[in-house]
Image (cartoon, rainbow, N blue to C red):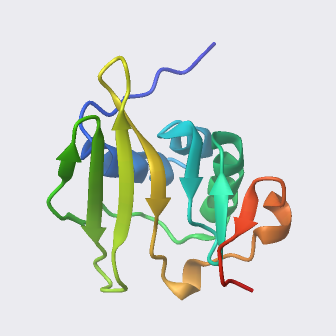
């Protein structure tokens, strides 16, 4: 039986859905918030490409991250046609989180680029487990 999950009807919904699914430990549901060829700038120093690789990263992240996750203060969304730039200000003042989302043909929204700024204490060393889907960022060691 296939589980039906809520879908983002606005770009701003993506942050709330991410937090709900992360708190539920739902790595598959987190990956469904991304387009099939999306890019996630995580783990630190690498880019993870593709929904399946993002799912694997989410599994590792959920295994190491403290819970509960909290919905963070949203900054104004910038839209251009079917694209939206969303961002949040982390409660711990560690920087900012930025995402680019695209409106899908059915009117829902999915992330295509995600750059989380993660606190050092929840940065698991996961690069070896995602070799097939992660690429080092330019200038990263």
Q: Which corner quadrant holds the N terminus?
A: top right
Q: Which corner quadrant holds the C terminus?
A: bottom right
In front here: 102 or 122? 102
- From the top left corner, tell me how far across and down residue 87 is, in percent: 28, 63
**Where 102 sits versus 113, above or below?**
above
Residue drawn at x 46%, y 58% is 114
- From the top left corner, tell me how far across and down residue 94 is, in percent: 37, 86
Residue 34 falls left or right of residue 82: right
In front here: 118 or 69? 118
Q: Which residue is the extreme one toward the top?
A: 1
**Where 36 sits versus 65, above or below?**
above
Residue 38 falls left or right of residue 64: left
- From the top left corner, tell me how far across and down residue 4 is, in percent: 47, 20
**Where 128 sits versus 16, above or below?**
below
In front here: 94 or 26? 94
The answer to whether any part of residue 140 appears in the image is yes
**Where 139 sits versus 37, above or below?**
below
């Amino acid at each position: 039986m296939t589980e039906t999950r809520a879908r983002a009807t606005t770009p701003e919904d993506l942050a709330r859905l991410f937090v709900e699914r992360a708190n539920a430990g739902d790595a598959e549901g987190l990956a469904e918030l991304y387009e099939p060829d999306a890019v996630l700038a995580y783990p630190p120093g690498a880019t993870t490409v593709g929904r399946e690789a993002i799912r694997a990263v989410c599994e590792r992240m959920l295994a190491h991250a403290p819970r509960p996750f909290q919905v963070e203060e949203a900054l104004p969304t910038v839209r251009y046609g079917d694209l939206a730039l969303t961002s949040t200000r982390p409660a711990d003042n560690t920087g900012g989180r930025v995402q680019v989302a695209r409106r899908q043909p059915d009117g829902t929204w999915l992330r295509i680029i995600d750059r989380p700024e993660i606190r050092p204490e929840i940065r698991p060393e996961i690069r070896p487990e995602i070799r097939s889907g992660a690429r080092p960022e330019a200038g990263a060691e």
